[in-house]
Image: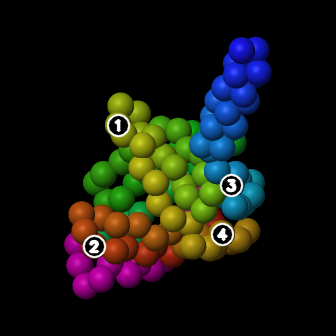
Amino acid sequence: MKSIYTLAAAALLLFTTSCETAPKFDRALLEGGWNCVASNTGGVDDLNPQTIKFNFNLDSTYSYTGGAYTESGKWRLEGDKLVTIADGDLEKKVQIDKLTADSLVLKMNDRGTDVTLILLQQ
């Protein structure tokens, strides 16, 4: 009977530790300010890339501005995903296609439209 409890505890530990995916990218590369310089919106023209700005802080907080819309909250890396949780909102995940010391490429889906943002470090 003791071995069943040990086996169950080991399985639970394995399950809880395997749920989080190790980051593919170095979080230090993401920290700082980013300005969008180009976007591919699949033909949707309501996105002005020059108004899009992100700031990722050391304390895992972020701010985002896109035109008149702003948000702030917490961020983390999970595998090849950037996960943001805006204050009072749900978690969002976007794919990081590329992250270097001076460039960031994000791929996401906005209301059924594939969107790619190309950002440069400030």
Front-most of 50 and 4? Answer: 4
Q: Earlier in the sequence, mark 2 or mark 4?
A: 4
In space, the residues marked 1 and 2 are separated at their CA atoms by 21 Å
In space, the residues marked 4 and 3 are separated at their CA atoms by 12 Å
Q: Earlier in the sequence, mark 2 or mark 3?
A: 3
Residue 59 image-quadrant placement: top right
Front-most of 119 and 84? Answer: 84
Checking the image for residue 89, the label placed there is: 1
Mark 4: amino acid? Leu
Checking the image for residue 113, the label placed there is: 2
Q: Is 110 placed above or below 85 here?
A: below
Q: Which residues are magenta?
A: 33-46
In space, the residues marked 4 and 1 are separated at their CA atoms by 26 Å
Tag 1 secondary structure: loop
Which residue does the numbered mark 4 point to in the structure image? 99
Mark 3 residue crowding within 10 angstroms, few (<14) / some (14–19) / many (20+): some
Which residue does the numbered mark 3 point to in the structure image? 23
Residue 15 image position (x, y, % from top left): 63, 37
Point out the image quarter for the C terminus.
bottom right
